[in-house]
Amino acid sequence: MDKAVDPAPMQAARDTGSLPQAAMDAYWMPFTANRQFKKAPRLLVGAEGMYYRDAAGRQVLDAVSGLWCVNAGHARPRIVKAIQAQAAEMDFAPSFQMAHPKAFELAQRLTALAPAGMNQVFFVNSGSEAVETALKIAIAYHRVRGEGARTRLIGRERGYHGVNFGGISVGGIVSNRKHFGTLLAGVDHIRHTHDPARNAFARGLPAHGAEFADDLERLVALHDASTIAAVIVEPVAGSTGVLIPPQGYLQRLREICDRHGILLVFDEVITGFGRTGRAFAAQTFGVTPDMITCAKGLTNGAVPMGGVIVRQQIHDAFMNGPEHLIEFFHGYTYSAHPLACAAGLATLDTYAEEGLLTRAAELEDEFADAVHSLAGEPHVIDVRNIGLVGGIELAPLAGQPTRRAFDIFLDCWQQGVLIRTTGDIVALSPPLIVERAQIDRIVQTLRAAIRRAA
Ligand SMILES: Cc1ncc(COP(=O)(O)O)c(C=O)c1O
């Protein structure tokens, strides 16, 4: 017998502002409290500029760029048109042993934004895939150079590198790891950089903690450098709740990697494309890694796409052997998808035309003033900021971790502002087109919700 299918959910949402229960059953939602959500769904049906429109027709101010990706704001006409035109012109081109011109154009434009010497990009479809790809490049790079014993991968406690097996293995968020068995073998972690006793309420880069990078020397002493392929860190840890690198920390990590021939990977999936005031956080902090993973803002979130930007000599190390042979046995059906490339090119045009890649630097002081004005509100135990990223850490409700922050999230949603919480930390990352009055509204709404929270 056929399964009964409800009338189109979209029409139901339009008519009633919600969905019948049966229309929600089949969708197993990612990183969501499914049962709770389906009792009181939060449905988005439209988006333009700084705002979402929900199913009830309310305007919701987007304080998190969707999910750290819509850096130029929603439904930007140039990007919309580019995707529409590309879909009509050529929907798909195979990416293995074939290509289309926009893939090369986007590669050129993207690497032009990257630090000097990082001239090659491998396209993928998400941040998670970018991470897996970078880890594989690291191990294979050492092997093609005759250092095949360098297979160990080093991540950092509290790191988030997506959800695939490599990413959760080098990642350091317990709930993302503990259900999934033994993960990848040969992975270790340096300590995280959170040090509230010394750094709470620091503006910008915290003063203390450069020495946390020395934890890598401990792992080198334990495993020997000759077994270590790469270290991967987020320059600013986002998903764990906005941890800003201490002054001098990334420089020190770079020095230690150089000393031991270890590749350094910056996971810039959220810091890429202007979030910290330059195209990449590598430039904001003046530290050039060997690879940068990016995604999200690459297409302004409009079409899934990611990339691994690689130093020229890493790429070149693969370019040997007979020319008719594939040099790197890796790639995705949708690598450099034509729609993604079209969206990416239009996105980079939009960023350039509107000066968005440096706008976070222009707004940084005012944004910092606004978020730090929350210090002193009830339950607020730390405020952190860099560029257009803010983290507000709350003391957990006794016996109910994450509950207080989630209640604040729901309260802000009711008031028409979309924020994001992780644990008991509120993260703010508005589109780079945000106006000063909108920063005020975000922070005042959050303040009122914090005051109302249990
Ligand atoms: C630093 C970092 N790496 C990787 C990812 C995974 O990206 P995706 O969800 O596109 O797979 C994220 C997503 O938030 C991220 O913040």
Image (tube, grey):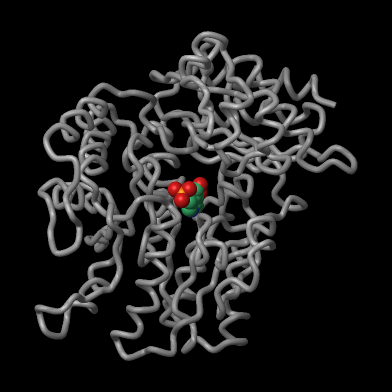
Q: How many marks?
A: 0
For residue 426, which quarter of the picture? top right
Residue 127 at x, y percent in the picture:
43, 52
Q: In the rendered view, does 107 fall on the left or right side of 219?
A: left
Depth order, front residue of 406/433: 406
- Residue at (63, 56) in percent of width and height: 176
Q: In the rendered view, does 44 fall on the left or right side of 113?
A: right
Residue 152 at x, y percent in the picture:
50, 80
Outermost residue to the front: 1
- Note whether residue 409 is visible: yes
Residue 335 at x, y percent in the picture:
27, 54
- Note whether residue 437 is visible: no
Quick check: 3 above or below 176? above
Q: Looking at the rendering, in which quadrant would you find the C terminus?
A: top right
Depth order, front residue of 211/346: 346
Quick check: 236 above or below 309? above
Quick check: 338 above or below 55? below
Residue 444 at x, y percent in the picture:
65, 17
- Residue at (69, 55) in percent of width and height: 175
Q: In the rendered view, does 114 fall on the left or right side of 411?
A: left
